[in-house]
Amino acid sequence: VGGIQIDFSNTTSGGYVNTTTSETPAGGLPPTAYRFLGTYYEVTTTATYTGDITISFQYNPADVHGQEANLKLFHWDGSGWEDITDHVDLNTHTIYGITSSLSPFAIGELANQAPHVVPFSGATIDSTETYTATSSFTDTDAVSASWSATVDYGDGAGAEALDLNPDKTFSLSHHYATPGTYTVTVVVTDDGG
């Protein structure tokens, strides 16, 4: 299979290396918070070896939803997926790992996590006043690089675009035409969906 390289640190007898690909994982589900790019690699050998093996796989950058630098190479150890990543070469779209055995391998990336809006203050205001508040949001994954937001002030006007600051803060400001109780809803969406 093209795009795969295996370097044994020490072989004691020669043999063949066999690599097959599959769209179905030979191991279990990806580790929590990860998703696999979709191709699984089963690598076996008839050679006898000792020591570490450096293994690399080329990947298609179009399959990556987040940042390529955050990719991980996982190795099925018989009971779970182990992160064996050594480094990612962004120029050749190749991921390298170090392991002591061969088995199923998969390339994974952090699954997108939705941003979380920090609760903001409510207020009791007169009908002549403007409601204002400031807040922020967090996005715990390393997948997202940009965000957009809407705010619905709950008075029937519907959602409108909300400007976000580079430090992940935002300001709310709205004048209500009639007295009442209103629910303000802020939705932040990242570039991962």
Image: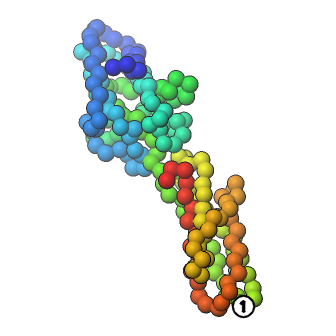
Q: Is residue 63 above or below residue 92?
A: below
Name the amino acid, label 1: Asp
Identify the residue under disc 1: 126
- The image quarter containing residue 101 is top left
- Within 10 Å of disc 1 (Cα), the crowding (few <14, some 14-19, many 20+) is few
State the image coordinates of residue 127 (x, y, percent, origin top left).
71, 90
Quadrant in which the N terminus is drawn: top left
Determine if residue 93 is in view.
yes
User: Left or right: where does residue 130 sit relative to residue 70?
Assistant: right
Looking at the image, is 2 positioned above or below residue 151? above
With 10 as the anchor, is 141 left or right in this view?
A: right
Position in image of residue 89 (x %, y %): 53, 26
Question: Residue at the location (24% across, 15% down)?
Answer: 46
Q: Residue 82, how many percent across, how many down?
A: 38, 37
Q: Nearer the viewer, residue 174 or 52?
A: 174
How many numbered dots are placed on residues in this image?
A: 1
The residue sitting at 52% across, 23% down in the picture is 92
Please, what secondary structure does the residue beneath circle 1 have?
loop
Percent from the top left, x then y, of residue 193? 49, 53
